[in-house]
Each structure stands twice: as C-alpha cells, then as structure tokens.
Amino acid sequence: MNASSDDRQEIAVRSALIAAGLRVLATIPPGKLTSDAVVLEAGIDSASFAHHFDSTSDLLCAALALLSDRVRDKVTRIMTNMPPGLPRLQVAVETYLEASRNNSLLRTLSLHLRSDPHYVEFLRSRVAGFSLMMELELRTLKHPFPADTARLLTAAAMEVGATETLAGQRQPALRDAWLRYCETVAQ
Amino acid sequence: MTAQKRRLLDAASRLCGSVSVHQLTVDQLCATANCSDSNFDREFGSLDSFLVELQRRFDRQIVDHVVAVTSGTGPGLLRVQLATETFLSACLDQRDLHGWLVQARHRPALQDRLRNRNRAYALIFGSEMSALGWPDPAAAARLYMAMVNEAAVVEHRAGRAQPALREALWRLLLGPIGTTSPSTATNR
C-alpha cells in the first residue's frame, strides 16, 4: 500500500517536471532549456530532477513522448468511432499528420532531437506501434501480406511526416501518393 | 581519390564485422589502414565526414551495379523490380557495412547525405513511376524509396532476403496498374 502510494508520488513529480518543461519550452527554444528553469517553474527541488531525468535531453524526450501520446490518443478516439477498413486507416494517418503539423512545439522538439539516441529509440517504438495498428486494419481487409505491407506503408507515412516536419508545411503531393499506395491494398 | 583515402575507406570493410559504428574511433581506422591521424584529418577532417564519404562510396557502387544489371531494359515495372532487387541484394551482400551505415543514420551529416541521395534516386525512379501510370511520379518515387530503404533494413536484421516483403513491395508498386498479379505483370 505504501509502495503504491510512493509510486503515485513519483509519477506525480515526474509529470509535474514534464509539464513545467513544456511551459518553459513555450517561451524558449529547446537548446536553451536548463534543469534549473524546469525545477523553478515546477516548484520542485533540483534533486528531484536528477532523480527522474539523466539530462535535459532526457526531459525533452519525455516531453516529446507526452505530446506524441496526445496525437496518438486523438487518432485512437477518431478510429474508435469508425468501422475497420481502408477509410479508417486513411483518416488515422491524415489526423496524425495534421495534428503533428499543427503542434509547433511537437515539430520543434522533433527537429531538435532528431539525432538524439533516446529519440531514435522512442521513434522506433512508436513506429512499431503504428505499424501494428496498420497491420490490424490490413488483416480486416484480408490482405495477403498484412505485416509486410503495414511496415512498408508505415515507412512511407513516416517519410511524409518527416518531410512535413522539415518543411514546416503540408506536402499534398506526398499525402496523395501515400493515399494511392494505400488504395492499392484494397485492390 | 588518393591512395590513403581509399585505404581508410577500405579499412571500414575490415572493421565493420567486429566493431560497432558507435564505438568506432579514428585510431582504429588509422591502425587498420596503416595511416597516421594527420592523414585521416587531411582526408576527412572528422568521423562524420568519413562516414558520409563511406555512404557515398557504398551508394555509388550499388548504383553502378544497378545500372549494369538494368541496362537494355525498358522503363517500367520489370526495370523497377530489377533495380530494387539488385539494390536489396547488394545491401545484403555487404551486410556488415550496410549495418554500420544504418546504425550511423541518426547522425545529422548522414541524415543530410541520405536525404540528398533519396531525392536523387526519386528523380531517377520518377520516370519509371510515370511509365507505370502514377499521376505524381516524383512523389510516388520518393515514398517508394522510403519503402525500399525500410525493406533493406528489415532484410539486414533478418540476414537474408524476405520474399513476402518484396512481394508486398511489388503489389504497392503496381498501384495504378491495378489487379495485375505482380509475378505475371508484363514490362510496361
């Protein structure tokens, strides 16, 4: 019982630090973020920061994960209200791309962390989750190679997302091409 | 290319099977190539520049091979398949070196190099996609390149060709042609 309470306390402190980090990041670029600024904003002692994060990069990755989770949750909510199939898959990717594009902090953090090994690992796990979601949709379509095709389509979707992140704007031609690739799976 | 530069790049092929690219040092390269640190600095300046040059040479060798294999084949599905198969097989043939370059991919210098490379490949593949009937061949080619690179990484991890993955690739490629079976589709 006590351990569980301690765990909750740990999670609350970590969440408070991430939330404080996000508030500070709304005012300064990620490269200028310091642990001092975060603990000051959170009203938590600096030892707690060191306990929860190895570095400011570690906190930035956690902040990016949180923002990314919000996008994923939005996609999931929309998908829940649609029947399985190709349109749902297409809406999911469009929603993901739009939400990613419209969140300037998400974009800034993605660009800032793109060479960070923690971020690369984080991205790999998210891509795997995305691919699995796509595979399940392809299975409902009775596609002969659901896992392989999902993997390839996910790579293509990530290319669209990465290009839009770098360009800072929608890439309609790439989105259309992705949708066309998607349509081939229903043929 | 100077002899020393070639020796240093060749040293990568000898080291890649036993050393992780994350642990690679200039000293290891120089010792393997029998060169001094100052030679390395003069030829490359940094490990990042070395890796970019290594990637460039790796790409150039594969492109030469792809061009040789596909020469005489008309634009269209068969040529794209042939080029893709050749690319994927070449990556597997040099699996350790390819693995190094995949591991180093998150370095900004490599990212820039790969982005430029993929853009160039997409331009070449654009004419092929056009022959296949894709309405925006450049965009389709760019995403196709992303999928081929993903296939190369999957096959690298598996250590061998993945026929189902390649079949999935052909099916996606056939988009505008429609329901034609990939294995029986004629060269368009």
Image (spheres, coloured by chain):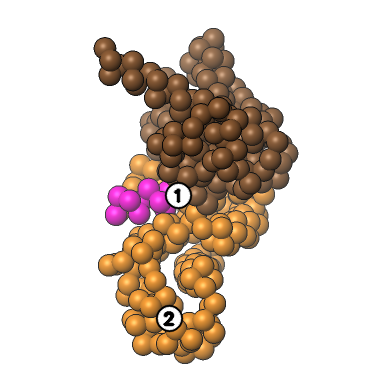
Q: Position of residue B87 (x, y in %)?
A: 45, 60
**Residue B122 in sight from this viewpoint:** yes
**Residue B130 in sight from this viewpoint:** no
Residue A146 placement: quadrant: top left
Colour-to-chain, orange: B
Q: Residues within 10 Å of mark 2 (few under 14, many from 20)?
A: many
Q: What colour denotes chain A?
A: brown
Residue B100 placement: quadrant: bottom left
Out of B73 and A108, give the one closest to the viewer: A108
Q: Which residue lies at the image location 42% right of the left edge and 75% below the top edge?
A: B26
Q: Please state which amino acid type lies under the numbered disc 1.
A: Pro
Q: Is residue B36 magenta?
A: no
Q: Please state which amino acid type lies under the numbered disc 2.
A: Leu
Marks 1/2 same chain: no
Tell me, for residue B8, which label it has, or none: 2
Left or right side of A10 for B186: right
**SS of the residue at dot 1?**
helix
* Residue matched to label 1: A117
Q: Is residue B154 magenta?
A: yes
* Callout 1: chain: A
Q: Which residue lies at the image location 39% right of the left edge and 71% below the top edge?
A: B25
Q: CA distance from mark 1 to mark 2?
A: 27 Å
Report the predominant secondary structure element of the magenta stretch: helix
Q: Which residues fall within the magenta stretch?
A: B151-159
Q: Position of residue B180 (x, y in %)?
A: 50, 37
